[in-house]
Structure formats: C-alpha cells, structure tokens
Image (tube, helix red, strand yellow):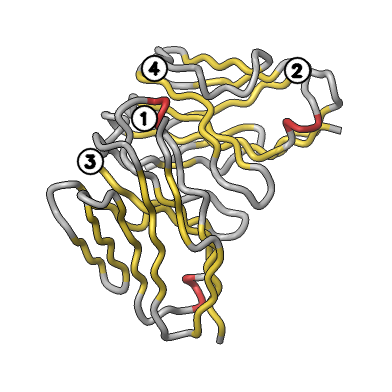
Amino acid sequence: GENVEQHPSTLSVQEGDSAVIKCTYSDSASNYFPWYKQELGKRPQLIIDIRSNVGEKKDQRIAVTLNKTAKHFSLHITETQPEDSAVYFCLPGYSSASKIIFGSGTRLSIRP
Amino acid sequence: GAGVSQSPSNKVTEKGKDVELRCDPISGHTALYWYRQSLGQGLEFLIYFQGNSAPDKSGLPSDRFSAERTGGSVSTLTIQRTQQEDSAVYLCASSSGQISTDTQYFGPGTRLTVL
C-alpha cells in the first residue's frame, strides 16, 4: 500500500531562523503535493501546494520543493515568527481513495 | 462565502449509544471527506464522497461506522454502539472537483466524547 513518512515529528527553532520539513511518499502516480497547517485547536488549512510539473514554488516566507525522482517534497519556512508555531501535515497526491494518507505531522515550535 | 460547517461542535454520549455527525460542504463542492483526529495525533482518513457515491469505504474503522451523502451536499457520519476509543475530533472537508488535485477545505470539527 501507499507509504507516507514525514520528518521530523517535532522541530524547535529560534525565531528568525529557518525550518525544513520533509515528506516522502511511495505512490508514483502522485502529481499534487500540498502542505497544511493546523494551529492549536483549529482546523487544518492549506498553506502552499505544488504540482508535479514544477520543482519549486515560493510564497513570501514559505516555499515547497519537489523531487519526483526521489519521491519527496519539503516545506521551507524562512525568517520564522511566533505565528508559525503549529503542526504541519503533508498530503502526497493520491491515485485512489485508498491512498489518501496525510503525513504524521510535524510540531513546529518557535523559540523567542 | 460560507465555509464548511459541522454540527454539533461538541457531543458527549454514553458508551453503547448511536451518534450522528453532520457536515455541510462548501456550495458546489462535489468531493467530501471525513477524517478522525485523536488528541494530539494525525489525520486518519475515513471515507470520501464524489457526488453521492462513496467509491471506497475501506478507511472506515469498523462496521459500526457508516456515512451517507444526499443531494450531493450534506453528509452524515453515523457511529453505532459507540465505544470509548471512538472519542476524537471528527473533521469534514470538501473540495471542488478531482480528489487528487484540489485543495481540501476543512470544517471546524465535531469533538466526540464517549463516557
């Protein structure tokens, strides 16, 4: 079946530093790669996504990079701020419902 | 416009009782998803609908769980004979079209507590 791995599970960085979260998948048919952010007590929300025809996408301090050959994509947050503290989930694109598998999540904490 | 809504926001029930959870997707969204999130845990996929059809029910944890969607809009998730391990937040999401390439918009969730 589909295998999705997300690392690290927890990440603590100094405010202003960068954070990187990686998601590895196994379904070679995947062609859409979003990242969701879930703040404490709130619903998950899309923060950035990328499609398989590009290798990188950037939106202000947030970027996503994709390596389809190696089957992984990463979330990059630069100049981290306190409001970046949350749990982040990846969701590799799925070719069927049986493969809708979110990554296990990364709890990001920003130290003042 | 209105986002995804869910009701009730909180539900406390006794072990063995049945519960119904409701989801109102964004108007016009054809795909609808149900997830379960236990405290401090990840998002466990339960079932999805394309229109009124649920092509794959393999994500449902047991035969006590069922879901339906009518008129291509509202969906209900029913849990029969609830158990304490069913306690979790149940999240609904909807997307506009193809399940594999569209953003999912989540509702606020229903927090279910089984005593």
Residue depth check, mark 2 versus mark 1: number of the one nearer the observer: 2
Q: What secondary structure is marked by label 1? A: loop
- Mark 2 vs mark 4: in front: 2
**Numbered disc in front, either 3 or 2:** 3
**Vertical position of residue B73 compared to residue A107: above or below:** above
Figure quadrant of residue B101: top left
Find the distance from the CA under tag 1 to the CA under tag 4.
10 Å
Asked if both marks, 3 and 2, belong to the same chain, the answer given is no
Residue contact between numbered discs 2 and 1, judged by CB atoms under 8 Å = no
Bin the neighbour count of mark 1 within 10 Å (Cα to Cα): few under 14, some 14-19, many 20 and up.
Answer: some
Pinpoint residue B46: horizontal percent, then vertical percent: 53, 27
Bin the neighbour count of mark 4 within 10 Å (Cα to Cα): few under 14, some 14-19, many 20 and up.
Answer: some
How far apart are labels 2 and 1 at the CA level?
Answer: 28 Å
Label 2 is found on which chain of the structure? B
Picture disc at residue B27? 1
Choose between B39 and B104: the one closer to the eye: B39
What amino acid type should be assigned to the residue bearing mark 2?
Asp
Identify the disc placed on residue B18: 2
Instruction: Give coordinates of residue B45: x percent, y percent.
Output: 51, 33
For marks 2 and 1, the one nearer the N-term is: 2
Query: The residue marked by circle 3 belongs to what chain?
Result: A
Question: Residue placed at 42% from the left, 30% from the top?
Answer: A1
Q: Which residue is mark 4?
A: B72
The residue at which mark 3 appears reads as A31
Give the quadrant of residue B18.
Answer: top right
